[in-house]
Amino acid sequence: MGRLDGTVALITGGARGMGKSHVRHLLAEGARVVFGDVRDDQGRYVAAGLGEQSCRYTHHDVTSEDDWAAAVALTLEAFGRLDGLVNKAGILTFAPIAEMPLADFRRLLEVNEVGCWLGMKAVIDPMTRAGGGSIVNISSIEGFTGAAGLSAYSASKFAIRGMTKVAAQELARSGIRVNSVHPGGVLTRMIVESAGARRDGEAFIKSMPLGRFAEPVEISRLVAYLACGESSYSTGSEFVADGGLLAGPGCRATG
């Protein structure tokens, strides 16, 4: 018996990195999953290895209301209900404020912040009809603290943290729980490239209290916990998985 047997989840940004890990782990825990991305070749490749019986892939631009409506409709058509949403899709741009084009700043907020808000809005009705559900919004430790060069990214992750608390209050009476996850340094292409752009890689790892990056599945296990009934009394809360980075001074990493 898996923790998520009998449930159906929609996951964004599932074609690679942490999103792909979330797809695989929730499937392993018994959920049926629809996942989306804009990287269609990668997404279809991942889906082909997982099988159509319990998994579907769809093209999904999280800034598009139409794409959200289509993803929810596919989920209901394929599996008959919707119990969980994992808002993972996100982008990272590293640039000082003085050098960052306004278009890049706005684009990051559209994907990371507006995309998350649209996702919560899109699943309210089907989750309410299902008797409730769980929304897991992937923020970052940059939702607690800033780092030079990450003005847009940090703004979006602070926003996710705040929206999560508002949604938890608004949706509780419908049986929908909403929580945020705040990873630190996770061993994905995005974080490795970001870290390499800012500092020596070895020094970066040594600055972490646990002395290593997280494996993506270590975050996925937390996501699965929040998606399942074991976390039934948790809503509006922030769950940090950062290897101790926020425990004291030192290097900060994006999740």
Image: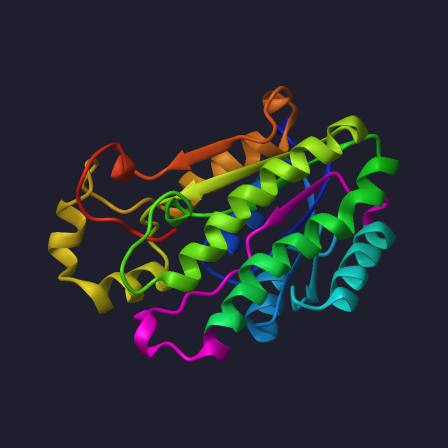
Give percent across and percent down for residue 230. 60, 21
Give percent across and percent down for residue 129. 88, 37
Work out whether residue 53 or residue 76 is closer to the camera in this orientation and state it: 76
On screen, residue 60 versus residue 243, left or right, reads right
Q: How is the image coloured?
A: rainbow
Residue at image position (73%, 35%) is: 170
Which of the 4 image quadrants contains residue 110?
bottom right
Give percent across and percent down for residue 191. 33, 59
Residue at image position (68%, 66%) is: 60
Quadrant of the drawing holding the N terminus: top right
Give percent across and percent down for residue 116. 62, 54
Q: Is residue 254 above or below residue 129?
A: below
On screen, residue 141 versus residue 201, left or right, reads right
Residue 251 visible in this rendered orientation of the protein: yes
How many numbered markers are drawn?
0
Q: Which residues are magenta?
A: 79-104
Residue at image position (21%, 65%) is: 198
For residue 86: magenta?
yes
Residue 6 visible in this rendered orientation of the protein: no
Which of the 4 image quadrants contains residue 52?
bottom right
Q: Is residue 94 above or below residue 140?
A: below
On screen, residue 98 versus residue 113, left or right, reads left
